[in-house]
Image (cartoon, rainbow, N blue to C red):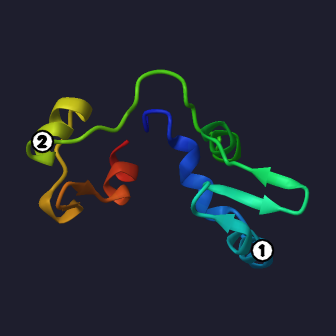
Amino acid sequence: MLAGFDHIINVEKVDINQHLVSALVERWRTKTHTFDFSHGEATITLQDVALQLGLKIDGLPVTDFIANDVHVACQTLLGETPPDKHVKGKMIYLTWLWQNF
């Protein structure tokens, strides 16, 4: 149970076309946050990313600012507390999440 993000685990298996990435980087326009192509502009939307990664984008968000200790937040939200070696600041290592959920 990864709160709808179980598909993201397979992202590392995606083949990356370095030439395509380079071409897109060259055409990225930071002022408009779009790609400048010879036939017009294109914007990558949340729906585009969701389609590519298989993520669900409907419903309540699963991320938020954690004002208190990450251990308390994990216990409250997940019912488990990660060991200190699996926590860095307010981040939890995915290996711990993968092993436990």
Which residue is the extreme one toward the right? 39
Q: Quarter of the image for the C terminus: give it.
A: top left
Q: Which residue does the numbered mark 2 point to in the structure image?
A: 67
Return the disc, 1 or 2, that comes first in the chain's sequence: 1
Label 2 element class: loop
Residue 99 is situated, as x and y percent measured from the top left of the image, at 36, 52
Q: Classify residue 92 by image quadrant.
A: bottom left
Q: In this view, does 57 lie above or below 37?
A: above
Q: Using residue 52 as the reference point, say whether residue 20 is left or right of it.
A: right
94 and 35: which is toward the camera:
35
Label 1 element class: helix
44 and 69: which is toward the camera:
44
Q: Residue at x 18, y 42 (%)?
A: 66
Residue 1 is situated, as x and y percent measured from the top left of the image, at 43, 35
Q: Using residue 39 as the reference point, say whether residue 6 is left or right of it.
A: left
Q: Nearer the viewer's eye, disc 1 or disc 2?
A: 1
Q: Residue at x 17, y 30 (%)?
A: 76
Q: Residue at x 70, y 40 (%)?
A: 51
Q: Using residue 31 as the reference point, say whether residue 89 is left or right of it.
A: left
Q: Residues within 10 Å of mark 1 (few under 14, many from 20)?
A: few
Residue 35 is situated, as x and y percent measured from the top left of the image, at 73, 59
Q: Which residue does the numbered mark 1 point to in the structure image?
A: 23
Q: Using residue 23 as the reference point, say whether residue 91 is left or right of it.
A: left
Amino acid type, callout 1? Ala
Amino acid type, callout 2? Ala
Residue 3 is situated, as x and y percent measured from the top left of the image, at 43, 33
